[in-house]
Image (spheres, coloured by chain):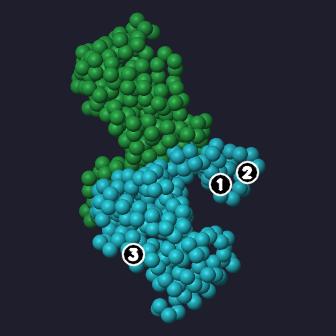
Chain colours: A cyan, B green
Amino acid sequence: PKEVEPAILAKTIQLVQKLVDVPLCIDSSIIEALEAGLAVYKGKALLNSVTGEDESLDRVLPLVKKYGAAVVAISNDETGISQDINVRFEVAKKIVERAADYGIPACDVVVDPLVMPVGAINTSGRQVMEFVHRLRTELKVNTTCGASNFSFGLPNRNGVNCAFIACAIASGMTSAIINPMHDEVMLGVRGGNLMMGHDPECKNWIKAYRDPAAAPGRGGRTGGRRRSA
Amino acid sequence: PKEVEPAILAKTIQLVQKLVDVPLCIDSSIIEALEAGLAVYKGKALLNSVTGEDESLDRVLPLVKKYGAAVVAISNDETGISQDINVRFEVAKKIVERAADYGIPACDVVVDPLVMPVGAINTSGRQVMEFVHRLRTELKVNTTCGASNFSFGLPNRNGVNCAFIACAIASGMTSAIINPMHDEVMLGVRGGNLMMGHDPECKNWIKAYRDPAAAPGRGGRTGGRRRSA
């Protein structure tokens, strides 16, 4: 409930930050909870989220600036989510410009292109790739998405997710909500990074997939996996 | 040897075309063998290959025109294979223009962007994607490549090939030399087609990956595979 969420969120963030050393994304629909979370957060937080609606921009962006956070930007406004990526691009542009008015740099705006299930909208993949490419080259923002939305309703979802995330990275996507415990998804992430030249000397790929039995003295290395070539 | 290859190639094509019903690619470094093969070939052949070298253009393109074939174009010339994709693009453009002089349409020129191993050249993937995009949008040619070149020397080559082929399709690649018996490679092909909207209603994906046990009466369907979602 609205009254207790600020205190609960602040307490939770403090507990989690005592236990793990990774950056967190603070997510609440209650603005007071976002602020309570930011107030206790150590490091640079990612805030979820701001939309192109004026009320959202006016309430969330001052917090982003005050606490030096980054913010996920959802490219919908008062009129909803457009199926036209040109309309969505204009919404994203409005958010970036409003953020700039507050002194928030474009790289701290992390736009979510809103991935639709390909089973419902066959052009969903092309839309995402074109939109991300424009966001990256024209607005110079970072990007994120709920990657598994794309595969909703299809069999072998992790296989779809694998291809989706590889292609999304190749089109310029800089982050995504994924499950890193799924081997096929991580194959897509590592493969996309290979394609983009984001894996110098292919070290991450080799570390993940080299055959530990083939390297003398490394048979027991944690994280090594045996794969057929 | 040069003297007997024309007869051997012609005989082989006739034998193969009696047995299978797929289009063939005729490949020889001996021009007389290419012509002997084309003379007996039924249907529209793909000829491998022509380069940007004048001698190659002058000898191969008349055959392509005479027999209504398509031709693989390798984007190197007398100076070798440039690492600069702008130079390679100019070579491809020269081949397309020379083909047009013979009345061969751009869609019958199938340019090979020459895929380098990412283990040796870290920017190889980006080069391929940028080059293919330009070939597709500016020259409007078809494209092909030796897909597994990309993974040369790395562990889990089929995993690399999976991501490579998905991203290559997403950048506009229209064909590739692959091994369709490798599940991970076919996952990349099918996933890339999903991303590009080339799989209407996702029928190919669903056909390949639906769980036959979940569809009553289809338990024994050939080609169905059980996968965890």
Numbered disc 1: secondary structure: loop
> In the rendering, at what x and y percent does residue A1 appear?
47, 91
Closest to the observer, B191 or A106: A106
**Mark positioned earlier in the residue sequence (2 or 3):** 3
* Chain bearing mark 2: A
Q: Is residue A121 left or right of residue A166?
A: left
Q: Which residue is mark 2?
A: A218
Kindly identify the residue that appears in the image at 60 percent across and 48 percent down.
A199
Q: Which residue is mark 1?
A: A224
Closest to the observer, A158 or B5: A158
Mark in the foreground, 2 or 3? 3
Numbered disc 2: secondary structure: loop
Kindly identify the residue that appears in the image at 37 percent across and 41 percent down.
B172
Kindly identify the residue that appears in the image at 54 percent across and 43 percent down.
B157
> In the rendering, at what x and y percent does residue B30 appear?
40, 12
Does the rendering let one see residue A163? Answer: no
Amino acid type at mark 1: Gly
Amino acid type at mark 3: Asp
Mark in the foreground, 3 or 1? 3
Q: Which residue is mark 3?
A: A54
Residue lying furthest right: A217
Badge 3: how crowded within 10 Å, few (<14), some, or many (20+)?
some
